[in-house]
Image (spheres, rainbow, N blue to C red):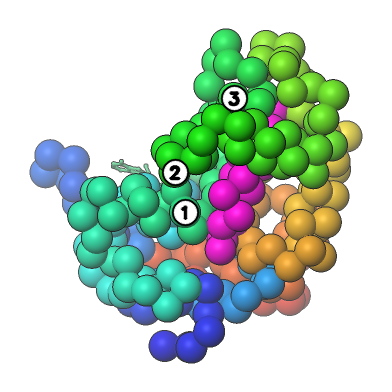
């Protein structure tokens, strides 16, 4: 294992079993991500990118292999510990934003702090800081029905950052956005990267992936370095 890595995986496997069907999706994923790195993960539809990101994000468990997050083995934690690590060390952003409906931007962003048992005044202050960071200080009381797609994604990014996670994960964060909002969200990720955030991002968009430090492709259940000539 690489010491000092934020994320270090060896031989991670995941097979789905639905009735008689057995689908080996990840057959042996090895990857290390250094502090401050931005890694893009590419791969065909159905290749297992979301499966891998859900394992990295501790929403799902591997069938085998090891996963160290900030040096700690998180491959076989019970549900409670997994939830705690997820809340404290991970921030996740999804293609469909996943905001709580009929809930203000401020409350959406403050939710992870509620689970972390942070007091009300500090929750509000930190959520406001995070929303300011993503350029939405003037939208704190709006709920999702009153925000554009790009704004919703920025709220989701603020929510992912509010606990100052070791690792920021994103699954197609620009996939549901038009070109202009997509470019805005991409700029925000670039800014977070400049500020030293460690980012693992799934994307189909080579223009987005081009901004990352490294591009890996998920193919036949494993991750490999993307060949340069393939474009
Ligand atoms: N919970 C599940 N149970 C059974 N099969 C699943 C489950 N989740 C995903 N799969 C299957 O595993 C494979 C990989 O799915 P996954 O969602 O990880 O792909 P992906 O690379 O993210 O695709 P896309 O680019 O379309 O988002 C697919 O064939 C999918 O149908
Ligand atoms: Mg997916």
Asked if residue 144 shows in the view, the reply is yes
Secondary structure under tag 1 reads helix
Q: Secondary structure at mark 3?
A: helix
Q: For the view shown, which residue lies furthest in the left direction?
A: 20
Q: Which mark is residue 88?
A: 1
**Gap between marks 1 and 3, in whole Å?**
18 Å
* Quarter of the image where the N terminus is located: bottom left
Labelled pair 1, 2 in contact (Cβ < 8 Å): yes
Q: Is 163 included in the stretch rendered in magenta? A: yes
State the residue position of label 3. Answer: 107
- Does residue 170 belong to the magenta stretch? no
Inter-mark Cα distance, 3 to 2:
14 Å
Tell me which label, 1 or 2, sits earlier in the chain.
1
Of mark 3 and mark 2, the one earlier in the sequence is 3
Rendered residue at 47%/34% (across/down) = 114
26 w.r.t. 83: above or below: below
Residue 116 circle label: 2
| Magenta-colored span | 152-169
Q: Relative to residue 76, is residue 185 depicted above or below?
A: above
């Amino acid at each position: 294992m690489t010491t000092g890595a934020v994320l270090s995986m060896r031989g991670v496997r995941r097979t789905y079993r639905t009735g008689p069907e057995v689908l080996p999706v990840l057959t042996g994923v090895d990857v290390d991500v250094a502090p401050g790195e931005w890694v893009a993960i590419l791969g065909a539809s159905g290749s297992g990118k979301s499966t891998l990101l859900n394992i990295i994000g501790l929403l799902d468990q591997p069938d085998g292999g090891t996963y160290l997050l900030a040096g700690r083995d998180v491959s076989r934690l019970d549900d409670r510990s997994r939830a705690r690590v997820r809340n404290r060390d991970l921030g996740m952003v999804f293609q469909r934003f996943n905001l709580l409906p009929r809930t203000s931007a401020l409350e959406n962003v403050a939710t992870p702090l509620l689970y972390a048992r942070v007091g009300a005044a500090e929750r509000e202050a930190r959520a406001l800081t995070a929303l300011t960071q993503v350029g939405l200080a003037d939208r704190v009381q709006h709920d999702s029905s009153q925000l554009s797609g790009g704004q919703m994604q920025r709220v989701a990014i603020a929510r992912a950052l509010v606990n100052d996670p070791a690792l920021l994960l994103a699954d197609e964060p620009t996939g549901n956005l038009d070109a202009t909002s997509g470019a805005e969200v991409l700029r925000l990720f670039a800014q977070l990267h400049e500020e030293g955030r460690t980012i693992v991002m799934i994307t189909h968009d080579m223009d987005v992936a081009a901004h990352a430090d490294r591009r890996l492709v998920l193919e036949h259940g494993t991750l490999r370095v993307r060949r340069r000539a393939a474009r």
